[in-house]
Amino acid sequence: TQLLEQSPQFLSIQEGENLTVYCNSSSVFSSLQWYRQEPGEGPVLLVTVVTGGEVKKLKRLTFQFGDARKDSSLHITAAQPGDTGLYLCAVPTGNQFYFGTGTSLTVIP
Amino acid sequence: NAGVTQTPKFRVLKTGQSMTLLCAQDMNHEYMYWYRQDPGMGLRLIHYSVGEGTTAKGEVPDGYNVSRLKKQNFLLGLESAAPSQTSVYFCASSSFLEQYFGPGTRLTVT
């Protein structure tokens, strides 16, 4: 059983479109992170959200932590080919991090 | 700063062979991790270390051993490789909640 479920698993869109990906769990977390992983590289941390209902923006990316701190969403406005990659959510638990299965995004020029 | 480096980048092993993956970080981080990444499975934690001389099991530790003799290095060993260990292996180090990942090692066991 996965602690974190991400959806959709795959997403292919045209440049300029908007999209939202989700990270869901039945557990409550003190914080949640989003990473982006480009092909052939390691994941890179994008953001950490810590407060229920919190919204953080990073240029065209908007991250929201659910009010109950069980889920999160990532919204990308006007997607660019450079946004292509695997988007992973993760939660720190004690000394460990648990990752979701990821959403693989392809933005077609 | 090089950040987190991993050697080698690619390796092919035959079943039953052994090997060691090396991870090095130059950020003076206390925490270091080894993950494996398989299609559709995300990243799964193999072992981690909270400081020099310490190691602990993660989610999928079977078939792997680790050592942290120096703060900057974290070694992952496979004593007798199996095809199920074919994967991409990532090392990470962290300061508080921020993890920094290496570029990965692609291991194939035939």
Image (tube, rainbow, N blue to C red):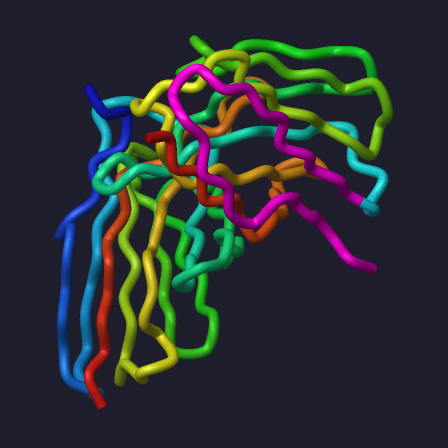
Per the picture, the main secondary structure of the magenta-coloured stretch is strand
Give yes or no for residue B7 being in the magenta stretch: yes
- Depth check: A11 or B62 in front? B62
**For this view, does A109 lie left or right of residue B50?**
left
- Tell me the residue at 50%/41% (across/down): B11
Q: Nearer the viewer, residue B25 or A2?
A: B25
Q: Which residues are magenta?
A: B1-25
Residue beneath the point at 19% across and 70% down: A19
Task: Tell me where residue B92 appears, x and y as whole percent.
Answer: 61, 39
Q: Position of residue A83 (x, y in %)?
A: 35, 74
> For the image shown, how many numbered marks are present on the structure?
0
Residue located 17% across and 83% down the image = A17
Q: Quadrant of residue A16?
A: bottom left
Q: Position of residue A89 (x, y in %)?
A: 36, 44
Quarter of the picture containing the N terminus of chain B is bottom right
Residue B4 lies in the magenta-colored region: yes
Relative to A63, residue A90 above or below:
above
Relative vertical location of residue A20 with respect to residue A89 in this rendering, above or below: below
Q: At which x and y percent is residue B45? A: 46, 25
* On screen, residue B85 above or below A62: above
Q: Is residue A85 above or below residue A26?
A: below
Q: Residue at x 45, y 11 (%)?
A: B63
Which quadrant: the C terminus of chain B?
top left
Horizontal side of residue B64 vs A84, given as left or right: right
Residue A76 lies in quadrant: bottom left
